[in-house]
Amino acid sequence: MTFKTNLLRSALFAAAAAVALIPAARADDHMIVKESARSVSETIDTLQAALEEKGISIVGRVDHQASAMKAGLELPPTMLLIFGNPKLGTPLMQTNRRIGIDLPMKALAWEADGKVYLAYTDPRELKDRHDIDGQDEIFDKMSKALGAFTDKATAK
């Protein structure tokens, strides 16, 4: 093997090792994961308040830890927030109704190894997943807004 080949293999191995260290998010799952400076419930509360302030509907909130406890099982704090804006989602569903499996949007906060994380699917990923053309403006708007909302929710 040449020096160049060894160098390339080393770089690829280092990149793969770095990706393996990303908590609970694989490189191929198209999720955006942010570390939060808040607790799980504070992260979800802050995200919910930011969404509601902009008129985005909260569809539901799931406390997975509480559900696990009811089943006699243990789970660290884990909460899911389900939310949406029909003015943005409906045109996407009119283009391809299958996107309804991913709408409304969801954000998951969880605690692992003493840290809290907040994750969501990048709305632009839904464009490719559901083969939707002609709605780039909506996907970009959703992605930008969700990035700002989650930045607010994860900051102290």
Image (cartoon, helix red, strand yellow):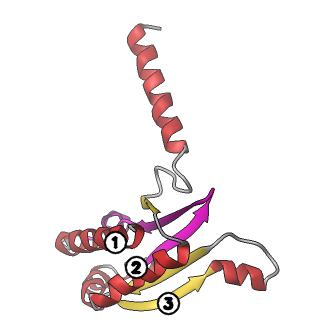
Give the camera-side residue of 136 and 146: 146
Residue at image location 38% in from the left, 13% down from the top: 4
Q: Which residue is mark 3?
A: 60
Reading the image, the residue beneath label 2 is: 47
Q: Position of residue 132 (x, y in %)?
A: 28, 71
> Is 49 included in the stretch rendered in magenta?
no
Secondary structure of the residue carrying tag 3 is: strand
Residue 108 colored in magenta in the image: yes
Residue picked out by circle 1: 152
In this rendering, the answer to whether 62 lies above or below 9 is below
Give the spatial CA distance, label 2 vs label 3.
13 Å
| Label 1: few (<14), some (14–19) or many (≥20) C-alpha neighbours in 10 Å | some
Looking at the rendering, which quadrant does residue 89 occupy? bottom left
Q: Nearer the viewer, mark 2 or mark 3?
A: 2
Number of on-image labels: 3
Say whether disc 2 or disc 3 marks the residue closer to the N-terminus: 2
Asked whether 132 or 79 is in front, the reply is 79
Is label 1 or label 3 in front? 1
Q: Are marks 1 and 3 in contact (CB under 8 Å)?
A: no
* Secondary element at tag 2: helix
Q: Quadrant of residue 152?
A: bottom left
Q: Nearer the viewer, residue 56 or 1?
A: 56
Measuring from the top left, give residue 147's x and y in whole percent. Answer: 31, 67
Please report the bounds of the magenta region as a residue range. 105-132
Q: Residue at x 48, y 69 (%)?
A: 38
- On residue 2, which mark appears? none
